[in-house]
Image: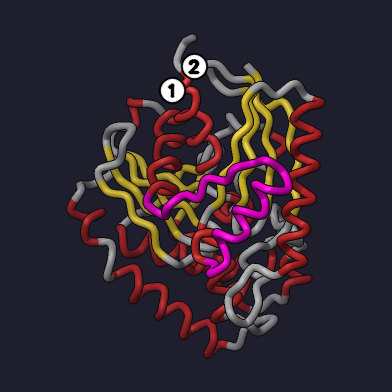
């Protein structure tokens, strides 16, 4: 069957169309996205602004047309931390439903972590043993550990790269004091939450997901995206110190000259690098294998499981 999913994240809104059947590998058929930066385009009161809501509605209507053109049989949509935390999030959801007919499912942070873990498990398989998954999004950081498809531990923390940049790294580039302060904040916040992950046991494979992780791995020398999803990619903790030192001295424009860094994500890459380094340090991880699947694919796989073979 042909399935479509609209992913309303903190940075981008993305329609992915896949050819998918229960038990089979979902094959991408079409992709359409916009850098809406939902978490950044908010009012001083934390509300999602009117222009942003209008742009979201317009884009979802575009997605519906594209889905129809591509013969999508099943379409669903979900939203993450930016919608979940906005005081007017419910009002925005109602407006989207009234004007587009699309009902948005707003995921909890723990469900984001669980579904990302499922995607990673399906990608790497049972032979990977205990998995530890680190997923850096725009609004939140998800961490999970387990030996099955359902993690033993799933945690979500407000340490997304976009959020930290907006709230704590205003300079371009940030001052040394800003960087030092946010580094300490990240590590203090993480140190208070990692105990359940450490108690869960030593992972047989540690995995990083998300655009931020892929960009950091690319800077460290991983294969470019055009080489395809099946090329092994990794990010080592020993490389992150060098990457952080490099990013600290670069403004947003200069960061876009680095391999794998898009203009839309360049501003938040330093925060993402600081989170990745802190997570690997505090969890005792020397290397992350980079997984091309994450939350969106996890939700597709779970939906296929529910649809069943019929």
Whether residue 243 is visible here, answered yes or no, is no
Q: Earlier in the sequence, mark 1 or mark 2?
A: 2
Where residue 185 appears, x then y in whole percent? 41, 79
Which residue is rendered at x = 47% and y = 11% of the image? 309
Q: Magenta residues?
A: 86-110
Q: Name the quadrant containing residue 163.
A: bottom right
Where residue 64 appears, x then y in whole percent? 75, 36
| Residue 182, above or below 5 | below
> Could you tell whether 238 is left or right of 258 in the image?
left
Q: CA distance from mark 1 to mark 2?
A: 6 Å
Report the disc number at residue 22. Answer: 2
Whether residue 166 is visible here, answered yes or no, is yes
Instruction: Report the quarter where the N terminus lies.
Output: top right
Report the disc number at residue 206. Answer: none
Which residue is rendered at x = 64% and y = 68% of the image? 48
Which residue is rendered at x = 62% and y = 82% of the image? 44
> Could you tell whether 218 is left or right of 31 in the image?
left
Task: Give the number of marks.
Answer: 2
Where residue 47 appears, x then y in whole percent? 61, 72
Question: Who is closer to the viewer here, 296 or 227?
Answer: 296
Question: Who is closer to the viewer here, 24 or 303?
Answer: 303
Q: Quick one: which residue is furthest to the front in this view?
A: 98
| Residue 278, above or below 1 | below
Q: Name the quadrant containing residue 49.
A: bottom right
Residues marked 1 and 2 touching at CB (< 8 Å): yes
Disc 1 target residue? 305
> Could you tell whether 196 is left or right of 125 in the image?
left
> Could you tell whether 223 is left or right of 273 in the image?
right
Where residue 273 appears, x then y in whole percent? 53, 65
Q: Residues within 10 Å of mark 2 (few under 14, many from 20)?
A: some
Q: Is residue 148 magenta?
A: no
Which residue is rendered at x = 53% and y = 31% of the image? 300
């Amino acid at each position: 069957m042909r399935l479509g999913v609209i992913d309303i994240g903190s940075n981008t809104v993305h329609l992915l169309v896949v050819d998918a059947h229960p038990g089979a590998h979902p094959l991408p058929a079409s992709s359409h996205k916009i850098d809406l930066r939902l978490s950044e385009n908010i009012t001083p009161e934390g509300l999602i602004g009117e222009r942003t809501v209008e742009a979201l509605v317009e884009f979802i209507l575009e997605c519906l047309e594209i889905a129809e053109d591509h013969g999508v049989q099943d379409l669903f949509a979900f939203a993450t931390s930016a919608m979940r935390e906005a005081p007017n999030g419910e009002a925005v959801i109602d407006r989207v439903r009234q004007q587009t007919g699309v009902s948005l499912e707003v995921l909890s942070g723990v469900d984001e972590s669980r579904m990302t873990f499922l995607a990673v498990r399906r990608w790497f398989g049972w032979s990977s043993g205990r998995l530890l998954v680190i997923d850096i999004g725009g609004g939140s950081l998800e961490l999970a550990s387990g030996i099955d498809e359902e993690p033993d531990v799933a945690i979500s923390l407000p340490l997304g790269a976009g959020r930290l940049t907006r709230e704590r790294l205003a300079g371009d580039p940030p001052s040394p004091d800003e960087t030092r302060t946010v580094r300490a904040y990240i590590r203090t916040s993480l140190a208070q939450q990692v105990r359940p992950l450490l108690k869960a046991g030593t992972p047989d494979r540690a995995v990083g997901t998300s655009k931020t992780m892929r960009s950091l791995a690319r800077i460290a020398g991983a294969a470019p995206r055009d080489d395809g999803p099946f090329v092994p990619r990794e990010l080592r903790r020993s490389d992150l110190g060098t990457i952080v030192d490099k990013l600290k001295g670069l403004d947003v424009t200069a960061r876009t000259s680095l391999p794998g860094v898009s203009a839309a994500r360049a501003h938040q890459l330093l925060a993402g690098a600081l989170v990745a380094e802190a997570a690997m340090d505090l969890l005792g991880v020397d290397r992350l294998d980079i997984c091309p699947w994450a939350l969106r694919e996890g939700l597709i796989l779970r939906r296929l499981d529910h649809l069943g073979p019929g």
